[in-house]
Amino acid sequence: MSRKMLIDGEQCHQAEAEEHYDFDLFVIGAGSGGVRASRFSASHGAKVGICELPFDPISSEVVGGIGGTCVIRGCVPKKILVYGASFGPELQDARSFGWDVNEKVDFDWKKLLQKKTDEIVRLNGIYKRLLTNSGVKMYEGEGKIVGPHEVEVTQLDGTKICYSAKHILIATGSRAVIPDIPGKEFGITSDEALSLEELPKRVVVLGGGYIAVEFASIWNGMGAKVDLCFRRELPLRGFDDEMRAVVARNLEARGINMHPRTNLTELIKTENGIKVITDHGEELLADAVLFATGRAPNSKRLNLNAVGVEVDKHGAVKVDEYSRTTVPSIWAIGDVTNRMNLTPVALMEGSYFANTVFGGEPTKPDYNFVPYAVFCIPPLSVVGQSEEEAVEKAKGDILVYTSSFNPMKNTISGRQEKTVMKLVVDGDTQKVLGASMCGPDAPEIMQGIAVALKCGATKKQFDSTVGIHPSAAEEFVTMRSITRRIEAGSKLKTNL
C-alpha cells in the first residue's frame, strides 16, 4: 500500500505503479456533485474514497459537512424558510376567501429554525448512508492534493494521512465573498443568515442576485423591514430584462425598500444596531446586514499550483469539456469550476464524469436548456435564452410573446400582483428559444416547459397543445399574438 502517515509536514510518496493505488478514485468534497460522482463511479466497479470537513451549518475552512452547500446551507434550508415566509401573506389573503383570521398571529422563528436544522441533519445522515451503501469509503478531514495521484487528508487531531488514487476529483464547491469595506466584520453571509438565533426586525441586504432577492423576500415575509441595495438599475443581472423589472416591481409592492445603483461603504456598530452608510451618503439602521455579493470557487487550500492544476483569475479550476483539468489524472466538477453554478448541473457533471472515466461511455455535460429558479416571493423561473441573448445570437427575426394577467387567486384576495409569462421564438424556424415566468408555482411549471424546449418544441406545437383550465400554466399554450418582432441586425439597448 502507498498510504503513509504524515508527521511534522512529511510529504507523501507517489505510488510507483498502478496496482499500488489505494483507490481508483479519490474525491475531495462531499457536496451534491462529489457524492453523485462517488456513488456512480462505485456502481461502475471503482474503488472510491471521499473526504469532507466535519459537519456544521456555517461553513469555514475547517468545517463543512457531507451534503455540501445545497443540503446544509443553501437550497434546502433556504426553501424551508421561503415556505415559512410565504404563510404571512397567505394568511392575509385568506380573509378574502372567508377565513376568520382576526386575532394576531404570532410567528416563532426559533421553532422554524429548529425544524430547518432537524431537516439538514436528517439529510446529512441520508447522504452518509448513500455513500456507505454504495461502498464508498468516507474520511473526515481537509483534503489537499500533493501529487498527480496523491491526496493528503488532515484529520481533526492534526494527523495527516496520504491516500493514492488513479484519479482525483475536485468537488469542493464555492464560498460566499465578503466585500472589503470598513466594518465588514459586522455583516453576515447566507451561511449565518440561515442560522440566526434571533429574527432581525431590520435588515439591509447588499446584492442583486439570487441570494439577495431570496433573503429579502424571506425576511420581508416574516415581518422585517428590508432595505435591498444593489449596484445596477434592476436586480438579477443576467436574466431577461423584462422579467427583472417584474421581480423588482413585486419586491417593492410587497414592502421591500429598493435602493438601485447603490453600494455600501461602511458599517458602524451602535447601541441601536448597525449603522449602514451607502455611497450616496444615506444612513440605514439594521439588526443584520447580509452580504450577498457573489461566491468564489473554494480552491485556495487545495495546493493546485504546486501540482500543475491551472485555475483562472477567480480561482476556478480550468477543465475541458469532459471535466478534466490540466493534469490528466485530476478532474473537477461543480461550482469550483465556475461553469454553471447550480446543484442539478453539478449532479449532471458528476454523473457524466463517472460515465466517462469508469463507465466506458465518454459523455460531455450538456448545458443547453438548463432551467433556473429564483425563489423570491413570488418566484421567477426561466429556461433557454433571454430576449437579449436571442437577439444577440439571432441571424433572423426574433418574435416575443408575452402574457400579463391577474392570477385567479388574486382576483378574490385583492392582491395587486400580476403573473407575467414570456416566450422567445426564432422567426424563421418557429422554435421556442426561451421561456420565462414570474408568478406563483413558476418553478413547478417551468420544469415541464424545459422538457419541451429540450426536445426542440416549436411555437406551433405550443399552440396545438390543450391547456389545463383553470390554471396559470395554460397561458403558455394560449399566447397567440406577437407582442413584438425584433428584426435581424437590431440590438436591444440596455444599461440595466
Image (cartoon, rainbow, N blue to C red):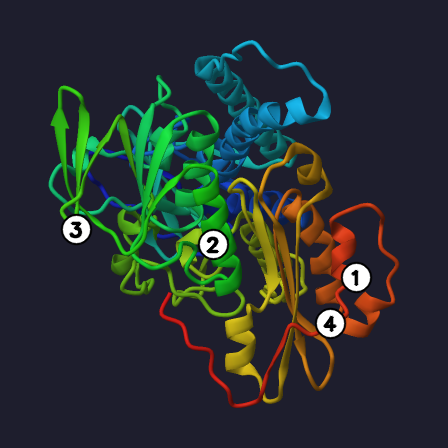
Three-letter amino acid code at disc 4?
Answer: Ser
Q: Of label 2 and label 1, which has the lower sequence position?
A: 2
Three-letter amino acid code at disc 1?
Answer: Val
What separation in Å lies between label 4 and label 2 (alpha carbons)?
A: 35 Å
- Residue indicated by mark 3: 280
Q: Which residue is found at the position 47% from the left and 13% from the top?
A: 108
For label 4, the SS is loop
310 on left or right of 487: left
User: Do labels 4 and 2 touch, CB within 8 Å?
Assistant: no
Q: Could you tell me residue 201's position as x and y percent?
A: 34, 23
- Give the class, few, some or many, for how many residues have Cα within 10 Å of label 1's Cα (few <14, many ≥20): some
- Residue indicated by mark 2: 341
Q: Nearer the viewer, residue 250 or 230?
A: 250
Q: Of label 4 and label 2, which has the lower sequence position?
A: 2
Foreground mark, 1 or 4, reads 4
Residue 319, numbered circle: none
185 on left or right of 64: left
Foreground mark, 4 or 2, reads 4
Q: Could you tell me residue 91's position as x and y percent?
A: 60, 23
Q: Which residue is found at the position 74% from the left and 59% from the top?
A: 476
For label 2, the SS is loop
Residue 481, numbered circle: 4
Q: Could you tell me residue 318's position as x and y percent?
A: 39, 65
Q: Could you tell me residue 92's position as x and y percent?
A: 58, 25
Foreground mark, 3 or 1, reads 3
10 on left or right of 164: left
Foreground mark, 2 or 1, reads 1
Q: Which residue is found at the position 57% from the left and 37% from the top?
A: 136
Q: Quadrant of residue 219?
A: top left
- Residue indicated by mark 1: 477
- Give the class, few, some or many, for how many residues have Cα within 10 Å of label 3's Cα (few <14, many ≥20): few
Q: Which residue in the rendered view is the most extreme toward the top?
A: 103
